[in-house]
Amino acid sequence: MARNLEPKCKQCRREGEKLFLKGEKCFTDKCAIERRNYPAGQHGQKKGRLSDYGVQLREKQKIKKIYGVLENQFRNIYKNADRQKGVTGVNLMQILECRLDNVTYLMGFGSSRSEARQIVRHNNILVNGKRTNIPAYQVKPGDKIEVLAKAKNQLRIKTAINSAEGRTFPIWLDMNVKEMQGVFKSKPDRTDISSTINESLVVELYSK
C-alpha cells in the first residue's frame, strides 16, 4: 500500500508549523519545529517569495500531510466535496474530519493519525458494534466508535487515550474514556476545525 515515507519532522519543517504527526513528541520541547523552524537541507534557511500558485500548492500539501492522504485520494475527496451542496471548502474539511482514522485519533485511541490509521487497519475499532478496518470510512452522526474488547489492554491505546484526556476532546464527540468508546454527535462546523488551514486556497488551485 502506498504511503508517504518522508520523515515526519521534516514534513513539519517543510510547512513551517506543527502538523502533529509524531504524537506526544509534538507537545514537548523535543519537537523539531521548536528547535529548527525552517525546511531541512543546505538551503532551508533561505526564504524565497512564493507565487500565488506556490502558496496554493503548499496549502494543499499541508492538508494532505495532516490527514495522511495521497494525491489521488485527495483529488477524489475534493471531487466528492465539489459535488455536494454547500461550500466546497467546508465540505472538503468535513469529509477529511469524518474519516474513521481521524475520528479514532480525535477520540484518543491513537497518539497520531498514522497510529490511529494502523489501529483501524488492524481490526481494533468497532463502528456500531461491527469491525471496520477502512481508514477512509465516513463516520456519520450518531455512530458509536469503540475499541475492540481484546485491544483495550494494548499499552499504546491506553497511553494515547490518557494523554488525549488531559487535552480535552472536540465538542462534537461524546466520550466515555473509561469504556474507551464515544459517539460521533455531528459533523464539525468549520469554526471547530483548525484555523491554520486555509481550504479556500485548495479550491482556488483546483478551480484553474
Image: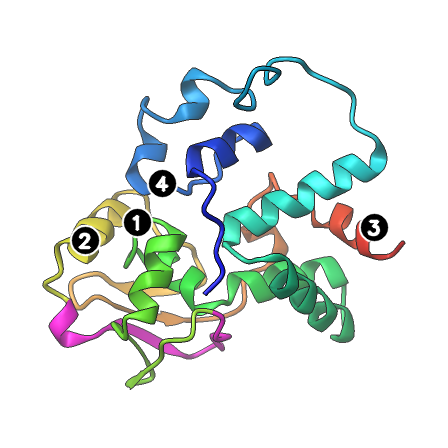
Q: Earlier in the sequence, mark 2 or mark 4?
A: 4
Q: Residues within 10 Å of mark 4 (few under 14, many from 20)?
A: some
Q: Residue 119's image quarter?
A: bottom left
Q: Check disc 2 and give the amino acid type.
A: Arg
- What label sits on residue 22 in the rendered view? 4
Report the magenta residues as a range: 136-151
Q: Quadrant of residue 123?
A: bottom left
Residue 196 percent location from the top left of the image: 60, 38
**Quadrant where the image shows the C terminus:** bottom right
Circles 2 and 1: CB distance less than 8 Å?
A: yes
Is residue 47 found left or right of 196 in the rendered image?
A: right
Name which of mark 3 and mark 1 comes first in the sequence: 1
Find the distance from the CA under tag 2 to the CA under tag 3: 40 Å
Nearest to N terminus: mark 3 or mark 4: 4
Q: Mark 3: which amino acid?
A: Glu
Q: Any mark on residue 156, and which?
A: 2
Write the residue at 74% across / 69% down: 79
The amino acid type found where label 1 is placed reads Ser
Image depth: mark 3 or mark 4 in front: 4
User: Helix, strand or loop at disc 4?
Assistant: loop
Quadrant location, the N terminus: bottom left
Residue receiving disc 3: 204
Q: Amino acid at mark 4?
A: Lys
Q: Residue at x 21, y 66 (%)?
A: 180
Q: Which residue is mark 1?
A: 111
